[in-house]
Image (cartoon, rainbow, N blue to C red):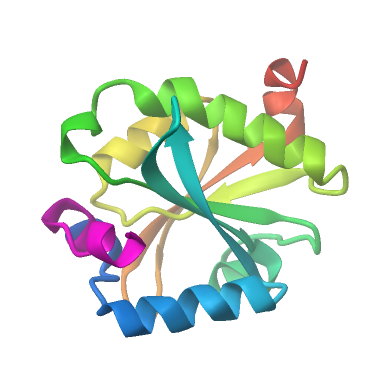
């Protein structure tokens, strides 16, 4: 399912993870068995609609681009159905996802986002929910826009 989603044109372009099923199977297995990242399927009203990765930002290549702390987390998200993209799901779901992550990990003080610098949709979402922009940074494989969402900003969603 995830391999099929990530090979859809809108996600292949955004993620560049348009891999065959076997590679996705190995990638997900490594995530589940490791302690770096956690893959999740996003379900809305019982229907699988997206893919999320929560990862240890301080162990990621982005850690050198900001003042990383050991408990920082990063979040990547993908909406599987192109018909649902730019329909207002992000502003509704992201606060709930962030609140769940921060509630589950009380040591985490911020969540990092690192979209491609050209991804206006994700950048707009980050700015809409109150993320702080930490600049654009050249990475080995792309140019990213780095954002942080601090626990204090997200506290409003943690009720």
The C terminus lies in which quarter of the figure? top right
Q: Nearer the viewer, residue 66 or 114?
A: 114
Question: As drawn, is 118 to the left or to the right of 43?
Answer: left
Could you say where residue 29 lies in the image, as x and y percent from the top left?
55, 78
Question: As drawn, is 11 to the left or to the right of 159?
Answer: left
| 116 magenta-colored | no
Q: In the orientation shown, which residue stands out farthest toward the right? A: 107
> Which span is picked out in magenta?
1-12
Residue drawn at x 17%, y 40% as measured from the top left: 82
Question: As drawn, is 61 to the left or to the right of 128?
Answer: right
Image quadrant assignment for residue 121:
top left
| 6 magenta-colored | yes
| Secondary structure mostly seen in the magenta stretch | helix
Could you say where residue 114 lies in the image, as x and y percent from the top left?
45, 55
Could you say where residue 90 lies in the image, as x and y percent from the top left?
40, 29
Image quadrant assignment for residue 85:
top left
Residue drawn at x 40%, y 31% as measured from the top left: 125
């Amino acid at each position: 399912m995830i391999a099929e989603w990530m090979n859809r044109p809108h996600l292949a372009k955004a993620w560049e993870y348009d891999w065959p099923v076997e590679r996705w199977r190995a990638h997900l297995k490594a995530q589940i068995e490791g302690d770096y990242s956690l893959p999740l399927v996003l379900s809305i009203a019982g229907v699988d609609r997206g893919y999320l990765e929560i990862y240890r930002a301080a162990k990621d290549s982005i850690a050198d681009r900001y003042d990383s702390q050991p408990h920082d987390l990063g979040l990547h998200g993908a909406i599987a159905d192109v018909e649902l993209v730019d329909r207002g799901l992000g502003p509704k779901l992201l606060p709930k996802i962030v609140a769940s992550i921060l509630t589950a990990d009380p040591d985490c003080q911020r969540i990092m986002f690192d979209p491609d610098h050209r991804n206006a949709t994700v950048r707009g979402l980050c700015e809409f929910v109150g993320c702080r922009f930490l600049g654009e940074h050249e990475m080995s494989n792309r140019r990213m826009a780095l954002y942080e969402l601090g626990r204090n900003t997200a506290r409003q969603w943690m009720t």
